[in-house]
Amino acid sequence: MKKKIAKLCVSFALLMGGIATSGTVSLILCIAAFLLCGAEVVINAVKNILSGEFLDECFLMSLASVAAFLTGQYPEAVAIMLFYGVGELFCDHATERSRDSVAHLMDLKTEEAYIKKDGSVIKVDPSEIKVGDTVVVSAGQKVPVDGKIISGSTSFDTSSLTGESIPRDAAAGDTAVSGFINLTGTVEIEAAATFEDSTVSSILKLIEESTDKKSHAEKFITKFAKYYTPAVVLGAVLIAAITPFVTDLNLSESITRALSFLVVSCPCALLISVPVAFFGGIGAAAKHGVLIQGSNMIEALAKADKAMFDKTGTLTDGTFHVSRIHSEHLSENELLKLAAYAEYNSTHPISVFIKKESGIEIDAGRISSSEEMSGYGVCTVIDGKRVLVGNQKLMKKESITCAAVETGCVLHVASDGVYEGYIVISDRIRPEAPKAIRKLHEIGVSKTVMLTGDTESAAEKVAKAAGIDEFKANLLPNDKSAEVEKALSGNPLIFVGDGINDAPSIARADIGVSMGGLGSDAAISASDVVLMNDRLESLPKTILLSRKTIRIAKENIVLSLFVKFAVMILCGFFGADLWYAIFADVGVCILAVLNALRTLKLKF
Ligand code: ADP
Ligand code: MG
């Protein structure tokens, strides 16, 4: 960057010298200036032609400046290259800035980690950490891998992941997600995933891939440039060849005209400013804890008009409480413990709650196998006994007669085919859910639907409280994705899930959104948008942000095309000066990029 600036400055000084002097001295100064700022562009143009990809902007610029040189317009020839260089520099800077705001997420990565081994703490590379290792994280350090705190308490700065500025308190039993910064105490964390499988790695992968997913607007521009450049070259040749016959200009004057036509026609304003606008939009969202996987999703979000939601963990916040326990043989407490053991391997919000509620330390040695049946519950072998915990459907499937309970979310428990009783839990609707749904309707999302595996009565209560238009209950995960499939048509469809057991629906929808993706690798890689801040109201905000981003990108397309065509006509047909063409070209490029950079500052 600095080298580039220095080159341009020296070249500018030489050009000034060239203009001030005359004759051979002027020519030598101009040639020196040209070589400094233009040689690279000409070399690039030649390289591109050799690789079969000619007629790009390097070619346009080289053609224009070399032709200017040949017709004796030395200072103009230098100016074309010089200002093209300035424009490029400016655009590089803009791209870098928009990239920065996404890249501050890159800062999540830790270079070193400390693990406990044979009683002493040793330093290792994060990639060497194995599942089950005890990782020691002191104040000021970043959590290297996802895991569970086993001792100590602290508060975490989660802002680079969630955009949340208030530190999050955490103590033994809580999860620690890679990328959190430990602010106060030292904690020991049991690694639940390797570095490769941790949240930070999946986010980084996502960001790397996001630039490959191009929006229609960007694809349009690439296509446009393909036909545009040859058309422009042809136009310039025609102007040079025909004007001497139809006007009283001589050949050299008509070539000058063709040249200015070439200079202003360079589409760099368009080529650079539109991707910068999209990148800025993605960056602005990232700053607030919303990851958008590519510009095509910005486009889809802006047009979305239907949204479907999962219930547990999405419209409700997953903080449950036990409202009733009924046990056939064991004490209530023992039933809860049995359920907690059965849920040991599951990450479902229900399991997380049951384990916490039981308050016991689980001895994993007693568990020999466990299976999660999405939409039903879990089946785990504990001390050789096959324990089932789940809903009525699960009991029916296993031919176990269970008590009929109508209210709330009911977890039936059975051990080796014997019914043990049930636990009724209820969860709380997210406090921000009604407002978020209202906002969605306000901004033009015409229909909201809730899909749930829970019972009709539990579903109705939540749908009503959240202000959801429609709901469907008693669905298995497969039924959910079938519902999503059915609803696909016309404008893009959003599905919001917790990402743990809704992956099929998230993948099926046009825009798969996962909430609370933190700590769930599968959720992050399956979804198009991740609300890492775990806030439902981010959804309408992200839609609005996308619309603004699209508007800015469109403004740029219209602005640059309009100015281009206007100046092209002025230069080609009315003989505006070559200098005018040079300034118009750089001017529109800078304007467009400045406009694109506004996306970075969009309110969220
Ligand atoms: P939702 O659509 O509300 O998110 P899920 O599809 O996650 O529901 O689950 C549907 C139902 O299946 C739950 O209401 C519960 O009864 C049962 N269930 C699912 N997973 C578990 C589990 N790990 N433990 C107990 N019950 C479960
Ligand atoms: Mg769910």
Image (cartoon, helix red, strand yellow):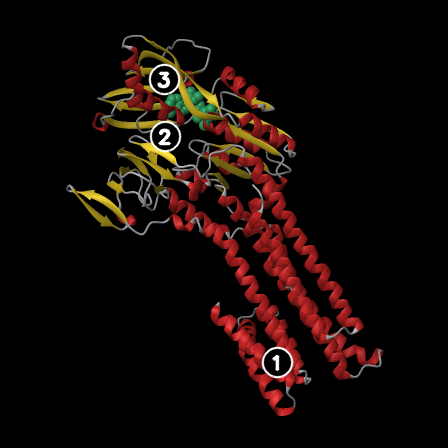
Q: Amino acid under label 3?
A: Glu
Q: Which residue is mark 3?
A: 398
> Do the residues under discs 2 and 1 have CB atoms within 8 angstroms?
no
Q: Residues within 10 Å of mark 2 (few under 14, many from 20)?
A: some
Which element is circle 3 on? Answer: loop
Q: Amino acid under label 1?
A: Met
Residue at left 79%, top 71%? 573
Q: Which x, y percent locates residue 470?
A: 59, 23
**Cα distance between the residues tagged 3 and 2:** 23 Å
**Cα distance between the residues tagged 2 and 1:** 70 Å
Q: Residues within 10 Å of mark 1 (few under 14, many from 20)?
A: some
* Lower position in the chain sequence, tag 2 or tag 1: 1
Vertical relation: 184 (above or below) 71: above
Q: Which residue is mark 2?
A: 347
For residue 16, which numbered disc appears in the image?
A: 1
> Do the residues under discs 3 and 2 have CB atoms within 8 angstroms?
no
Quarter occupied by the C terminus: top right
Residue at left 34%, top 16%? 413
Q: Is residue 214 visible?
A: no
**Cα distance between the residues tagged 3 and 1:** 89 Å
Disc 3 or disc 2, which is closer to the eye?
2
Mark 1 and ligand 2: say if the CB distance to the nearest ligand atom is below 8 Å: no
Vertical relation: 475 (above or below) 39: above
Which element is circle 1 on? Answer: helix
